[in-house]
Amino acid sequence: MEYNGGSVVAMIGKDCVAIASDLRLGQQSVGVAMNFEKVFPVNDKLYYGLPGLATDVYTLREQLRFRVNMYRMKEEREITPKTFTHLLSSTLYEKRFGPYFLEPVVAGLTTPTELEPKPKPFISTMDTIGCITTPKDFAVAGTAQDKLYGMAEGLWEPDLEPEDLFETISQTLLNAVDRDALSGWGAIVHVITHDKVITRQLRSRMD
Amino acid sequence: MALFDQRPAYAHEPTVAPIEHRFSPYSDNGGTILAIAGADFAVIAGDTRQSEGYSIQTRYARKVWQLTDNATLATNGFAADGKNFVKRVKQRLEWYEHAHHKPMGLKAIARMIQTMLYGRRFFPYYVYNILGGIEEDGTGAVYSFDPVGSYEREACRAAGAAQSLVQPFLDNQIYFKNQTPAPGAEAFVPGRLPMATVLGLVVDSFTSATERHIEVGDGLEMYVVMKEGRQTTDLTDEGQLPAGMKVEELGSMGEGRGEKTFLVSMPLKRD
Amino acid sequence: MNHHPGAWGQPLPAHAQFDMFNPGQSYRQAPKAAPITHTQQPLVTGTSVLGIKYEGGVMLAADNLASYGSLARFRDIQRLHPLGKQTVIAASGDMSDFQWLKKELDSILREENGLSLTDSHPSLSPQHIYDFLANLFYARRSKMNPLWNAMLVGGWDNKKNESFLGFVDLLGTTYSAPTLATGYGAHIATPLLREAYEDKAGIDGKGPLLTAEEAEKVLADCMKVLFYRDARSINKYQTATVTSEGVKISDSKSVETEWGFAESLRGYGAQNQ
């Protein structure tokens, strides 16, 4: 985890979720790139973040793209956040004894169906071998994990509207990565609502 | 005969070395401390849990110590070193008072602490210290130290087990990091927050740390050092303190200039 | 001939050659000072000790075993020791360090008692003895020559009219709480002791405390669980109570144990299956 650095945070709001990452890619203490996004879309209501070893980020992202496309073709529908979490989990567990060095975070909204007419906003996170946790408030991962926990625990409150959630997750991420030598160098935030995704790049300390 | 052939090099007897068990004179007793300076007051706080590994040794052990009327010291790290270091500091303060017929000033205490810590450079006190109080010019001040005496004056500082959780929060809320004033509004100045706001932030910091760190919890003690002229009612008045607080005024310790120290305490989660 | 004063009267070692350039060193035998030895590991050890505050006093418990590694070497050792009329100490860890400590403390107490007879010199309270122990243990650890013990100090302060219970160990770490346990007992007995204490007194300790009978019962329960699970324990223990009346150390006692279940467990009871 400490080889390339980087952090991801996700939060639940009122009928919305947000997920954000820093943009640093490093080789230990040396910064290499400042445009390394760690959050990727699955569809327009589901994003996931992969903080950890950069080479594994590419591998797992492509692996997941393949598996989600197969799912889409076989099922002829979009994958739900919950199903995607389990897909990701089993993909990680396949490499139980030589794991990907990644701690994924998933954030998404479930489209209402007849079986589940009022789905709740969904976030989840897991360890390197796919052990899932589904928090009701926020999920954090990466080299600034401790700091993100402290910030999020202090700033987050239930039922935030999209714009307030954006402010909360942005402040959480920025202040956490500013105290982490291996994270920072810019940040990107996605706020997912039922009718749109708001994506903003944040200006931050670049030291 | 193959049976008596010399064994290959990789199959030599495993060397049996006695397990080296050297006495380690240190331990880590967990917990977290925090101090914030205001314009004319300082808050020095610490939780009351003392632990070793996964065991809670006691739910009430003191980490914050009133030194003089205008100085309070918080210690965190190895509890035995902490207690004995505070004992030595108090002894030096008493000697100073006998020699000079006045209590030592805050910045002098800070320099003395650095000297005492550095004096043990090669067998350090495994303790992080945060000193808070009222400076001789009447301003609230916080000094933070590392175990071997490096120190600086700051507006706020967290140390201990949950430092990494609390310090970014303080950067944001005390130093207003990553915040910009609304267009036309006054600029943010750190160290000028009202007491009620500061106490609220201390409580939030510790409840957050308690939630996410196993070594933090059980109880919270906040020592509030106020400049002369401020009243007890500044603390006890409606809306100054979050609910469920116990306030106790600590008596004067000598010939100060009328600074007051209060102990505000509350329970924290015990799990 | 060596004229160095250090060699006066010393016989010449056999086959010694005189070093004319270094006469002082040549065949004067250097006195062989024994190397300074520190306790680097405990040898004969006592296992956990327990303590709890109850209504009107404090109660400590310790079993009678002093082990030599895994060998149950001395099975009638008293690990509770009275110090004057208001204090008891209970020791786990190295028993020779404990015996040295007893001797040292007894001598200090004797001196202090002599003084307290002749003038208004106050006798040592439990707090005094505890502070002395804490300072001693911390000083010894700072010399890298620790007393290898974890100790409980129980007492009754006649002036304040309240009980005292404190812990101190080889690092000089100190703390106090209404219930305390050392070693294995800190893991196994502490939850039982705290539960029993808090059930009556509440988490703030403001409710009524356990009675002496209840305290004795919960200590017996803890000693039983420890005997079941601590391989370095023995089913023979003593309790000490300190009240305003003074110190009482009980005779050795044991608890009822149940081993019937072992028969049905392969590898636990007799091997007949």
Image (cartoon, coloured by chain):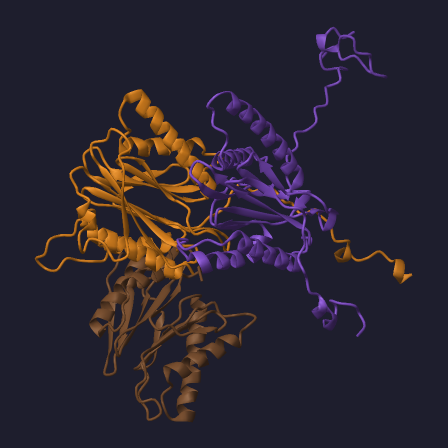
Q: Is residue B34 left or right of residue A86?
A: left
**In this orientation, which residue lies closer to the viewer: A68 or C174?**
C174
Q: Is residue C81 left or right of residue B104?
A: right
Tell me the quadrant of the picture where the C terminus of chain A can be found: bottom left
- Percent position (x, y) of residue C17? 81, 14
Q: Count the labels in the image.
A: 0
Chain for colour purple = C
- Percent position (x, y) of residue B268? 36, 57
Chain for colour brown = A
**In this orientation, which residue lies closer to the viewer: A109 or B220?**
B220
The answer to whether residue A180 of the structure is visible from this angle is no
Q: Is residue B233 left or right of residue A84?
A: left
- Percent position (x, y) of residue C179? 50, 51
**In this orientation, which residue lies closer to the viewer: C145 or C160?**
C160
Residue at figure coordinates x 66%, y 42% from the top left: C78
Chain B's colour is orange
The answer to whether residue C38 of the structure is visible from this angle is yes
